[in-house]
Image (cartoon, grey):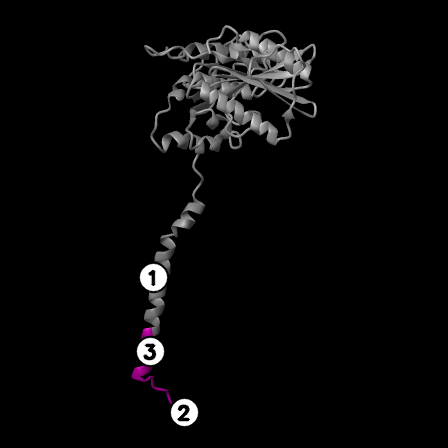
Amino acid sequence: MTARRKRVSRRERWTAWGVLTVLAAIVVWLGLAQSRLNPAVLVALSPPPATGVAASQASGRTFADAAWLESLPGAQPAGPVESYDPETLSDRIDGKAELYLAANFQEMSIRAFRLPDGTRLEVAVYTQATPTDAFAVLSSQRRPGASPSPVSPDAYATENALYFTKGNRYVEMTADRAEAATGPALAALALKLAEALPAEAAAKPGQGAARNVKALFPAEGLVPGSVRLAASDAMGMEGFSNVYTAEYDLPSGSATAFLAERDTAEAAAADARAFAGFLKQNGYAAAPPPAGAKLPAGVVALGADGSFEILWTRGRLLAGVHDAVNMEAAVELTARLAASLKDVTP
């Protein structure tokens, strides 16, 4: 028996053509989609930008500090100059940026160099708003065991690093090794860089030179290298800013002296009251000094367990003794500090 060939109807033929058309459209759409990735996918697949260089290149901004790192006599560049502003500083020193920002940070440039003996080092130049701000950064980061350096009056060095200020610039030099030749090599480079950096701008006509508050501390009993400037939150009190401290070893015990200059005598008195209130909130109570103690007029004396505080004002200066181990040490340092301020214009 011969099989009969089934005839395809017109409706079935049109249906088949329709299916083929739809399939072709899907293929075309898939091709276009693959050639045009989602923006989010493109971002995910793109390599991350180089944060340091991008900080200067992305904005097109010129960083003044970068010029000092174009070359250093006696060292060869080992990488590009990277520059940062207040918005990008944490990209480089995440976790420490607040220290610089609190001291009115403006910009920073850093570059790697290599010495003839193969030592690799990084040199960073920070610009703060004022020389006082630069000292605040320098002093707050002083390393234990650091020794004075001849580069500048406040410079100090460790086995593989050197730190100094000039004007409103703070400089860090850190080497990858600590050998006998490392210290002298860093000092030689630092001296050359310090010579190149601009000096502090002269006072404008009619504007007096800023008072050197840190020079007002008495020298006797002062622990070398202990003078510091807290740009913010001094001695744990939020908002207590620009306070110099200096540590002392006295015959009667250890104590810390502090000084802060304010714009007006009223502002100094207000800060004295605020700090006394802060101490009382933290467990301190009135602790009258011994009878006959020669102290400045208007002192406030407070004490807690093994810690004594004395504070007073002299014009625009707020002065005091912090965390003395006993009242005798507090009184002794108060007398010394008051004597050193006797001839200071209030």
Do residues under tags 1 and 2 come within 8 Å of each other at their CB atoms? no
Label 1 belongs to which residue? 28
Q: Is any part of residue 290 visible from this angle?
A: yes
Q: Amino acid at mark 2?
A: Thr
Q: x and y percent of residue 308 in the render?
A: 65, 21
Between residues 45 and 128, which one lies in front from this camera angle? Answer: 128
Q: Residue at x 55, y 25 (%)?
A: 275
Q: x and y percent of residue 95 in the render?
A: 53, 32
Between residues 195 and 47, which one lies in front from this camera angle? Answer: 195
* Crowd tier of the residue under label 3, counting other residues whose Cα lies within 10 Å: few below 14, some 14–19, many 20 or above: few
Q: What label does residue 2 carry, if any?
A: 2
* Crowd tier of the residue under label 2, counting other residues whose Cα lies within 10 Å: few below 14, some 14–19, many 20 or above: few
Q: x and y percent of residue 169 in the render?
A: 44, 18
Q: Is residue 327 above or below residue 24?
A: above
Between residues 116 and 122, which one lies in front from this camera angle? Answer: 122
The magenta stretch spans which residues?
A: 1-18
Tell whether position 69 is magenta.
Answer: no
Q: Tag 2's secondary structure? A: loop
Tell whether position 14 is magenta.
Answer: yes
Among the 4 quarters of the image, the one containing residue 48 = top left
Q: Is residue 123 above or below residue 28?
A: above
Label 3 belongs to which residue? 15
Q: Amino acid at mark 1?
A: Val
